Amino acid sequence: MIRIGNIELGGFPLILAPMEDITDSPFRIICKGYGTDLLITEFISSEGLMRDAQKSNKKMNFEEVERPIGIQIFGSNVESMVKAAEMAEQAAPDFIDLNFGCPVRKVVMHGGGAALLQDIPKMVQMTSSVVRSTRLPVTVKTRLGWDDEHLEIVGIAERLQDAGISAISIHGRTKKQLFGGKADWTLIGKVKENQRMKIPVFGNGDVDSPEKALEMRNRYGTDGIMIGRAAVGNPWIFSEIKYFFSTGNRLTPPPLKERIEVVLSHIRKSVEYKGEFYTILELRKFYSGYFKGIPDFKPIRMKLVTANDLSEIESILNGLAHRDE
């Protein structure tokens, strides 16, 4: 049984990776319905929480069905991170996750996310301070290192464990790689093999099929897998992996009718959560995944991504459903 503190996650948990403007509460709930074992909020700026920014505060919202769930925070200032953790604790998640892996410029240029891979002592100090400030388990998501000359994750993981974290998730790329190239799980495996490591080690990067998930589990021995981009518009990847693990067979992809129902559910939940305008914009990222493999979908996708009205989108989807009858 894999545990984060007292949170029981089963024998080999599948985790939805936090992704900005993607893994909001509506999409997390959908993924939960398809077998995700652990959810984490989109990353939340510690400075945004200090300023009482509406967007930052809203990201801490979740529904009971999403448990177990962690609130992920990022920042460059130790004191602000401690205060942000205290604010996050008041929202009553199951754990707090520290983002030391985001490589995007707007985060790194201000000293947050993967920028801390250039200042390991500060990363450890920040982690230790947050751990001491909260009664909740604290976890970390990070990368292999800053670049290929600084692949320091084995030592980093040890130091973060010593600082008191309850689990670590490692993306198999450096900061310099961003999301390009191929994820290297070799060092993730070395972290897991390290006899000093007692906490769960989760691997992340390029797992986009049940076969790849099984290969990563068997070859590198991680305690679970975190899935990000492969889940966008493809929430059933979690149920497909679990089915493959238990039977050795591929689960048939959902029929068109079910996919349309999922999209409509996503739309309804998203409108309640963030309103019609942002729902229309952000759902455009999901259509290719939701309807992957559907014949002659490209012209329909073009209609969906250019539609500016929810009734028009629903009409297109209903027309697609009738085509399948």
Image (tube, rainbow, N blue to C red):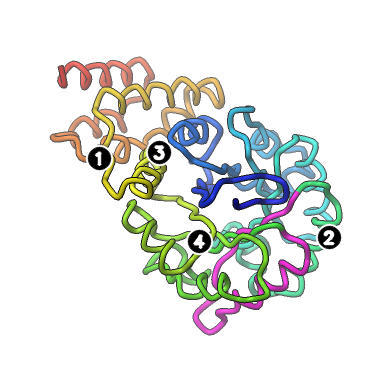
Alpha-carbon distance for marks 4 and 3? 18 Å
In this view, the residue in front, 184 or 296, is: 184
Instruction: Identify the residue at horizontal 75%, vertical 35% (top origin).
Output: 92
Front position among marks 3 and 1: 3
| Left or right of 264, for residue 269 | right
Residue named by callout 2: 129
SS at mark 3 in the image? loop
Instruction: Identify the residue at horizontal 57%, vertical 42% (top origin).
Output: 39
Alpha-carbon distance for marks 2 and 4? 25 Å
Alpha-carbon distance for marks 3 and 1? 12 Å
Three-letter code, disc 1: Lys
Residue named by callout 3: 235
The answer to whether mark 4 and mark 3 are in CB contact below 8 A is no
Sooner in the amino-acid sequence: mark 1 or mark 4: 4
Instruction: Identify the residue at horizontal 50%, vertical 61% (top origin).
Output: 203
Image x and y of residue 163, in percent: 78, 66
What mark, if any, has residue 203 been given in the picture? 4
Three-letter code, disc 3: Pro
Q: Vertical placement of 68 versus 106: above or below?
A: above
